[in-house]
């Protein structure tokens, strides 16, 4: 049974939230597996332009300061996106991160976009997956000695929820690796709902969407399956037509997480911020209302346990009115399935446990 350390957001004048984050790091005994001169990749999501749910740079500075005290060399990092947007190439991605406050003066360490200018610089890592036998991981992630995954915990339209496993699995892959993971996703247009507004056409990275007879049309031969058009549609006229199953997508994502962590399983740390828990990924240029109240921060050396604990913490909350949830949910009711009824989020946790990435069984230690 793995240990997950957790702190709520209550503070006093003598003990701020920054102090509590440092306490979490001390409890994980990060000093025992991060050594002098280690190159430490702090993997996070800088947020798409227009999104406001990403983790505050001030919180990252606390983590960076702690790691620098160990005479290490930390750097903030993320990979370029598959879809078009403000993070699709390294220059745009870097500029977006700076605009969102992740500059050296704010966080105290360099910012390196992993995977090269266009997300094509990667290393093929052999894995023994049920679906995949290799994962294409950004070179900077592979070359790092340690990895600290700092994740904004939220819902996700393809995996149910997005936490440590998604941050590492999808977030450390090159563009080619992201394509591999999305290959089973095929968005479809409901012509009865579509208004032909063309919002989706300008957002599609592969120009697979056009408007014919005042209705959006998706060319499946050109579609790369990124799924970003689904929530971009203001009329909810685009949905997922799984060419295989939601289970397969989650398995691929988890197997990529195994590839990203190869050689680092004993030199990895995972921190989940259960704050502003939004109903969709931070990849969108907006942040919808949180579905439950702000809960706290969790830390663990086990990515499976921390995601399992985070799911439980969210599901044990009462839902907030007037959000993407269509009805009020009581503590204990499944918030992820209420948002995305066709997606069983347990697949990623079960498969990660099967892959040896950690345990769903955990002990929650409140500090």
Image (spheres, rainbow, N blue to C red):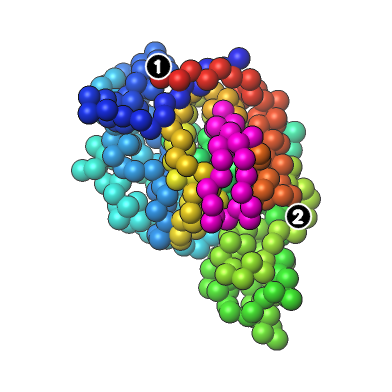
Whether the magenta-drawn stretch holds residue 305 is answered as: no
Query: Along the polypeptide, which appears first: circle 1 or circle 2?
Result: 1
Whether the magenta-drawn stretch holds residue 312 is answered as: yes
Q: Which residues are magenta?
A: 309-332
In the rendered image, residue 346, in percent from the top left (x then y), is placed at 69, 35
- Residue 224 occupies which quadrant of the picture? bottom right
Residue at the (36%, 39%) spot, across then down: 76
In the rendered image, residue 267, in percent from the top left (x then y), is placed at 46, 21
In the rendered image, residue 298, in percent from the top left (x then y), is placed at 46, 28
- Residue 349 occupies which quadrant of the picture? top right
Residue at the (59%, 68%) spot, across then down: 233
- 20 displayed left or right of 255: left
Count of labels in the image: 2
Residue underneath mark 2: 242
Residue underneath mark 1: 27
In the rendered image, residue 121, in percent from the top left (x then y), is placed at 49, 46
Where 58 sits versus 47, above or below? above
Residue at the (61%, 25%) spot, across then down: 357
The CA span between labels 1 and 2 is 42 Å
- Element class at badge 2: loop
Q: Nearer the viewer, mark 1 or mark 2?
A: 1
Q: Which corner quadrant holds the N terminus?
A: top right
Q: Nearer the viewer, residue 30 or 326?
A: 326
Q: Which corner quadrant holds the C terminus?
A: top left
Other residues around mark 2 within 10 Å, as few (<14) / some (14–19) / many (≥20): some
Other residues around mark 1 within 10 Å, as few (<14) / some (14–19) / many (≥20): some
Where 128 sits versus 290, above or below? above
Numbered tag placed on residue 15 in the rendering: none
Q: Is residue 50 visible?
A: yes
Q: Nearer the viewer, residue 75 or 124?
A: 75
Residue at the (71%, 58%) spot, across then down: 240
């Amino acid at each position: 049974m793995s240990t997950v350390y957790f702190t709520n957001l209550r503070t006093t004048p003598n003990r701020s939230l920054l102090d509590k984050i440092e306490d979490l790091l001390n409890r994980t005994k990060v000093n025992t597996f991060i050594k002098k001169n280690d190159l430490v990749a702090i993997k996070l999501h800088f947020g798409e332009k227009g999104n406001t749910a990403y983790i505050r740079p001030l919180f990252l500075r606390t983590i960076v300061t702690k790691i620098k005290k160990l005479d290490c060399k930390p750097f903030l990092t993320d990979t370029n996106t598959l879809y078009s947007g403000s993070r699709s190439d390294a220059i745009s991605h870097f500029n977006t991160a700076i605009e969102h406050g992740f500059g050296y003066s704010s966080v105290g360490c360099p910012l390196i976009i992993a995977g090269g200018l266009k997300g094509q610089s990667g290393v093929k890592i052999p894995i023994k997956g049920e679906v995949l036998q290799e994962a294409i991981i950004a070179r900077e992630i592979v070359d790092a000695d340690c990895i600290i995954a700092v994740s904004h915990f939220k819902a996700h339209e393809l995996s149910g929820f997005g936490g440590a496993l998604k941050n590492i699995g999808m977030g450390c892959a090159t563009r080619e690796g992201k394509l591999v993971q999305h290959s089973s996703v095929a968005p479809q247009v409901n012509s009865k709902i579509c208004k032909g507004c063309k919002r989706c056409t300008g957002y599609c990275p592969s120009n697979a969407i056009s408007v014919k007879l005042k209705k959006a049309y998706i060319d499946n031969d050109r579609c790369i399956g990124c799924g970003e058009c689904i929530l971009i549609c203001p009329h909810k006229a685009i949905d997922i037509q799984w060419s295989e199953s939601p289970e397969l997508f989650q398995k691929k994502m988890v197997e990529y997480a195994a590839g990203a962590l190869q050689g680092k399983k004993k030199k990895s740390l995972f921190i989940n911020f259960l704050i502003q828990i939004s109903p969709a990924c931070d990849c969108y240029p907006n942040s919808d209302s949180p579905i439950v109240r702000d809960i706290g921060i969790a830390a663990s050396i086990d990515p499976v346990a921390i995601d399992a604990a985070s799911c439980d913490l969210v599901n044990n909350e009462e839902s907030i009115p007037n959000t993407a949830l269509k009805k009020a949910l009581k503590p204990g009711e499944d918030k992820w399935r209420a948002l995305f009824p066709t997606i069983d989020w347990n697949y990623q946790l079960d498969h990660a446990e099967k892959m040896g990435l950690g345990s769903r069984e955990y002990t929650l230690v409140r500090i």
